[in-house]
Amino acid sequence: RVRSALRAMTNEYIFEQSNLACERLFISKEYQNARGIACFASMEKEFQTQLLLDRIMHDDKKLFLPKCITKRDMTLFEIPKNTSISELPKNQWNIPEPQVGNNALEDDHLDLVLVPGLAFSMKTRARLGQGAGYYDTWLSTLQKVRISRNLPMPLTIGLCLDEQLFHENDEIPLQPHDFLIHHLVAPSFSSLSSSFSS
């Protein structure tokens, strides 16, 4: 249902709505106080992050982006200052990827993890991913690393369009390995502390 709705949207609509959600994120205390932010470079027909990636770097925060290692595993590396995201090498999905760098798992300044998804539950904060399990696996590893180092888990924030929000009567099936997201941000909704009310 969500996939077909996304495919039917124009790229202009997705870009515009993504930017509206980003503006909600930018005015939040969680974003403003973050020292390091893990994000993602967008595929077609999903939440678009160009504005977000540029803003994170402009605001002099550490930016971490994923690199796929295997069919199930990824790691996130810091993007050096003054790097153009569009000039990074592309993977098989035509997504820019860092090759090496400071690993987000080992960085104490990682405060926010911005997570993509196909759909999110407003009630349970469950996330429906694309099916490969990259984020559930990486977040589980991050949690273990943080526990071992006696550090708090970074806040996880699901970024999506309004059409990707599931309400009371919709259910996203939960698997034992699935990670629940702390917060959600969409064009007309945000659960972050200082975003203006919807």
Image (tube, helix red, strand yellow):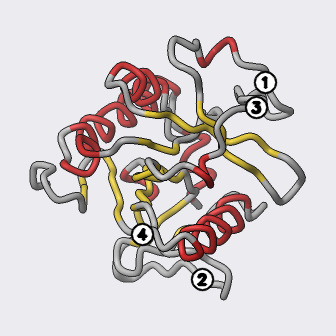
In the image, residue 85 above or below residue 74:
above
- For the C terminus, give its image quadrant: bottom left
The residue depicted at 28 percent of the width and 44 percent of the height is 31
Q: Nearer the viewer, mark 1 or mark 2?
A: 1
Residue linked to disc 1: 90
Amino acid found under the numbered disc labelled 2: Pro
The residue depicted at 78 percent of the width and 24 percent of the height is 90
Q: Quick one: label 3, few (<14), some, or many (20+) residues within 10 Å?
A: few
Judged left or right of residue 107, residue 95 is right
Residue linked to disc 2: 173
Residue linked to disc 3: 100
Question: Residue 144 sits in which quadrant?
Answer: bottom right
In the structure shown, which secondary structural element does the residue marked by tag 1 occupy? loop
Circle on res. 152? 4
Asked whether 128 or 83 is in front, the reply is 83
- Which of disc 2 and disc 1 is earlier in sequence? 1
- Which of disc 3 and disc 4 is earlier in sequence? 3
Amino acid found under the numbered disc labelled 1: Lys
Q: Nearer the viewer, mark 3 or mark 2?
A: 3
Distance of mark 1 from mark 2, alpha carbons?
Answer: 32 Å
Asked whether 106 or 38 is in front, the reply is 106
Do the CB atoms of the residues marked 4 and 3 lie less than 8 Å apart? no
Distance of mark 3 from mark 1, alpha carbons?
Answer: 14 Å
Q: Nearer the viewer, mark 3 or mark 1?
A: 3
